[in-house]
Amino acid sequence: MLTATLEQGRERTDAALHRLLPEATQHPVSIHQAVRHSVFAGGKRLRPILCMEAGRMVAGSLPRGIEELGAALEMLHTYSLIHDDLPALDNDDLRRGRPTCHKAFGEALAILAGDALQTRAYEVLARLECSAEARVRIIAEIAHATGTVGGMIGGQVVDLEAEHKKPDLATLEYIHQS
């Protein structure tokens, strides 16, 4: 049952991502190739699957358009990975056994690919099939979770600052929670 749920969730997410992202042949080609290189580099798609399953638990079945919300979360996750892999941050050459975006396409295009994914994610969120009030609350929650105060970017900053010192427990907890 769990294996089937994970596989179906991954398939739904990948289908939504294919539908929502520009084709690799869309002008300007280089940015769309870089975006797709990173988004379709493998991965379990746990964030969108958890999103879909939470929606199923609340609504009793998969809510209409939930795949778009999950895909937007995956775009944001991938943007963070692209930026995290850059030489100025973790300087990783490989992700999931493949060259990282900056290794395959150069640093400038990797930065722009991450930016493009973040922008596209919010564009998708702004068009979710739900009430305007719910849409605004979803966008606000996700923006906060990716921001600097208790969010992903803040966690990355504290992680960078702790890199060459031994962080205390409170710092480690902040990094992992953010």
Image (cartoon, helix red, strand yellow):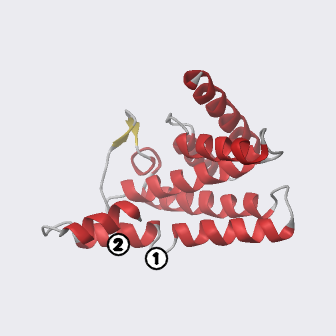
Estimate the x, y position of residue 138 in percent, counting from the top left. Answer: 70, 65
Q: Which quadrant does the N terminus fall into?
A: top right
Q: Which residue is mark 2?
A: 157
**Of residues 8 and 163, which is closer to you in this image?**
8
Q: Residue at x 62, y 28 (%)?
A: 5
Tell me if mark 2 has few (under 14), some (14-19) or many (20+) residues whose alpha carbon lies within 10 angstroms of its own.
Answer: some
Indicate the amino acid at tag 2: Val
- Determine if residue 148 is in view: yes
Indicate the amino acid at tag 1: Thr
**Of residues 3 and 17, which is closer to you in this image?**
3
Secondary structure at badge 2 equals helix
Q: Which residue is mark 1?
A: 148
Measured in 3D between alpha carbons, the distance from the residue under mark 1 to the one under mark 2, in whole angstroms, is 8 Å
Tell me if mark 1 has few (under 14), some (14-19) or many (20+) residues whose alpha carbon lies within 10 angstroms of its own.
Answer: some
Estimate the x, y position of residue 14 in percent, counting from the top left. Answer: 66, 35
Q: Residue at x 68, y 53 (%)?
A: 28
- Determine if residue 22 is in view: no
Q: Residue at x 39, y 58 (%)?
A: 84
Q: Is residue 38 above or below residue 143?
A: above
Q: Residue at x 59, y 44 (%)?
A: 50
Question: Farthest residue toward the bottom?
Answer: 149
Secondary structure at badge 1 equals loop
- Quarter of the rendering containing residue 98: top left
Estimate the x, y position of residue 141 in percent, counting from the top left. Answer: 62, 69
Q: Is residue 145 above or below residue 130?
A: below
Labelled pair 1, 2 in contact (Cβ < 8 Å): yes
Estimate the x, y position of residue 158 in percent, counting from the top left. Answer: 31, 72
- Quarter of the rendering containing residue 33: top right
Q: Is residue 130 left or right of residue 24?
A: right
Query: Could you say which disc has been placed on residue 14 in the image?
Result: none
